[in-house]
Image (cartoon, rainbow, N blue to C red):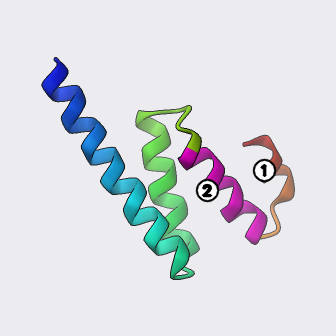
């Protein structure tokens, strides 16, 4: 079980890294999708929550940004 968990953690870290790269490149749609995919597997991930809130703020969705 620990091996599966480590592999999943590694996959999620790579997905979060890909999301952050898309975000820095200005591709908010791709970044949002990847942040949400991380949150499906790890709902309280602080980095994904924070960066998804930033995406929402950048789009002017302030209520959603504050909710996150």
Image coordinates of residue 46 in percent, x first then y, are 58, 40
Q: Main secondary structure of the magenta part?
A: helix
Residue at the image point whose x is 17% and y is 28% from the top: 4
Q: What span is in magenta?
A: 47-58
Residue farthest to the right, as pictured: 63
Q: Give the residue pinned by disc 2.
A: 51
Crowd band around label 2 with a 10 angstrom C-alpha radius: few (<14), some (14–19), many (20+)? many
Front-lying residue, 20 or 36: 20
Front-lying residue, 37 or 20: 20
Image coordinates of residue 18 in percent, x first then y, are 38, 65
Whole-angstrom CA distance, mark 2 to mark 1, is 12 Å
Front-lying residue, 21 or 28: 21
Q: Are marks 2 and 1 in contact (CB under 8 Å)?
A: no
Q: Is residue 52 magenta?
A: yes
Residue at the image point whose x is 52% and y is 37% from the top: 45
Front-lying residue, 12 or 61: 12
Q: Is residue 28 above or below residue 61?
A: below
- Quarter of the image for the N terminus: give it: top left
Residue at the image point whose x is 51% and y is 82% from the top: 25
Q: Is residue 21 above or below residue 33?
A: below
Which is more N-terminal, label 1 or label 2?
2
Q: Give the residue pinned by disc 1.
A: 64
Residue at the image point whose x is 55% and y is 61% from the top: 32
Crowd band around label 1 with a 10 angstrom C-alpha radius: few (<14), some (14–19), many (20+)? some
Q: Is residue 18 magenta?
A: no
- Quarter of the image for the C terminus: give it: top right
């Amino acid at each position: 079980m620990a091996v599966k968990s480590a592999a999943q953690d590694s996959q999620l870290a790579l997905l979060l890294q890909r999301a952050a790269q898309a975000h820095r490149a200005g591709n908010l749609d791709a970044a949002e999708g990847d942040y949400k995919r991380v949150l499906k597997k790890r709902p309280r991930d602080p980095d994904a929550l924070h960066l998804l809130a930033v995406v929402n703020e950048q789009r002017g969705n302030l209520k959603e940004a504050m909710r996150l």
